Image: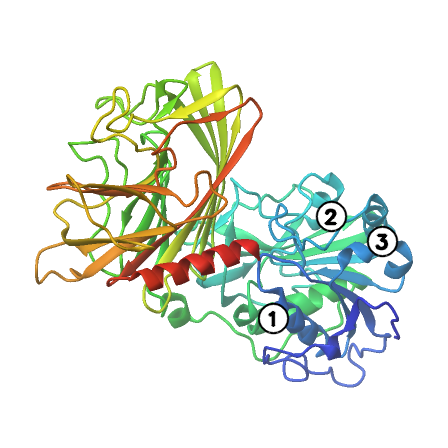
Amino acid sequence: MTMVARNLIPAAAWTLTCLLTIGASAFPPPEVGENEITDAPIRVLLLSGANNHDWKTTTPCISQILEGTDRFVVDVLQQTHTMTAAMLAGYDVIVSDFNTFIGRYKDPRDPGWTDATKRAYIEFVRRGGGHVVVHAGSSSFYDWPEYQELVITSFRVGQTDHGSYHAFPVRLDVPDHPITQGMSAFSTIDELWHEAPVPADATILASAFSSRASRGSGHYEPIAMVKPFGKGRSFTLLLGHDTRSMENKAFQTLLARGTEWAATGDVTLPVPEVWPGIDVNELTTSEDPLRWRRGDGTLALTESEHVIWQFNYSAKTGKPHFHPISFGKGPPLTLNGPLDHPWHHGLWFSWKLINGVNYWEEDRLTNRAEGCTSWTVARLTTEEDHTAHIEMDLTYYATEAEPVLIERRVIDISAPDPDGVFHLDWTMTFTAVQDVLLDRTPLPGEPGGKVFGGYAGLSVRFALLMRDRRVISSDGPVTFEDDRYRSRGRAMDYTGIVGDVGDVGAERAGVAILDHPENLNAPSPWYVIKGPVMSYFSPAVLCYGPHRMAADERMTLRYRVLVHGGRWDEERLMAESEQFVNEIKD
């Protein structure tokens, strides 16, 4: 088939990044006279170009699997918004390795699907075409009911989740369906979703066991399902997170046979003679020491049960915060709820005064401040590469019925690099519901000033008895006066040693915070304490004066928090700062 559209890429044009066992060995030709394949090749349109997974490697693998059967001719479409009814008329089946996942992964150059594109897409299947989803290829268009019906299921934020990337067994729930007929149970290594909603009129062909040991649901979860859609057919396969999982012959078989069934309503491709089966050793072995751990209002990244970082967002906490935070296998660098200041919460954000109401200090018995703050976690996702993404909505009230300020908080957390360094990128957008005055305890020399005045904003409280402490700004080493330091700078780094001499992991480590040049009062004012007991620092955005916001006015603050070992100098701080700013520009 000859295609002339510029945005269509024949599968053969891909530079393949995976080597899969496919073709004759995976799908041996039947003996002459037995179910001989004589039909014309099935024409496949493979959607790609955007995905919260690595579509640049998975899309060519999907193409290779399908074309390796000699049953399909595949074209890849990266600019999915260019689809028209006339274009789709040249195909038998759409296979989706495409998603925008609530807009986060959408190409900014992609104008989105028009109403005409959406109608053409739905009508293609409704009038007899086939539709196939691979893994997260359905996680788009959550406000489009017909699309959600077509794709059968998708990752629903707040309901669906997944545990660690691990090995698990798969059973056949309908072994006599044309897709699964002749197959048997198998094991694979993949990312397994749990609590994905499946409508009652769909048929679940296969399910996988989601073990609690891998932070799953503790029961079987659907991974392959079918559903009629008008005169067409829809097949959804939730396996296939990456190219490693696509090496499994059972995945390849389900994908190829499911695509043939969706296109034609029949299956002629045979089941491979060599079948994966259930590998008990595979199910119990993992080389990755890092694990996600979820609890009631907590999410943690651990290494051999040692917590690297933990996010705490339960309503029972005074404020959403991170604690503990550790470097490597060392003791926690942070401190939560100390007797001297129980409203200090490891790594956290808090205003001091909003319209004269105190949001910082909390009642020692109730853990509540005078100003009321409520929050919901809109999205909390973890990836098998050990990165995480958190989105929160916060509301600040003067009284329970009087909101004064709302906040959209986004935190992206990197995986530890080979040196153990990781960062947390905070983006906080505040919108004033009414006229707002953000203020702090006055500084010495101001009316009512205090020696401890000036704090408000993002803060870190370090562990008790941190020793050999050293603080450096982007301008050089810091000199303290009365155990305190206030000045401006693009970045600040606070390091020390936590734990007794000889303790495992009792080495120098610390936290650096980078200010963004577009922040209010940039370069940031800093407030740092190096006292007999307290080790604390903050990019104290209000240190030198209050800030007014008119009703409906917005303000965004961005920071990068880096957890690292050793001592950094001002050159390293400036290099990290430049990288942070450049990444935001990109």
Would residue 96 appear left or right of 3 to someone viewing this image? left
Viewer-proximal residue among 209 and 138 = 138
Name which of mark 2 and mark 3 comes first in the sequence.
Answer: 3
Q: Which amino acid does label 3 sit on?
A: Phe
Left or right side of 80 for 424: left
Question: Badge 3: how crowded within 10 Å, few (<14), some, or many (20+)?
Answer: many
Q: Which of marks 3 and 1 is nearer the N terminus?
A: 1
Q: Can residue 288 be seen in this view?
A: yes
Nearest to viewer (mark 3 / mark 1): 1
Is 70 on the left or on the right of 556, as rendered? right
Q: Which of 554 and 397 is in front in this view?
A: 554
Q: Residue 124 carries which label?
A: 3
Separation of residues labelled 2 and 1 (CA atoms): 25 Å
Under tag 1, what secondary structure?
helix
**Residue lying at 47% horizontally and 13% vertically, measured from the top left:** 401
| Amino acid residing under circle 1 | Thr
* Visible residue check, residue 421: no
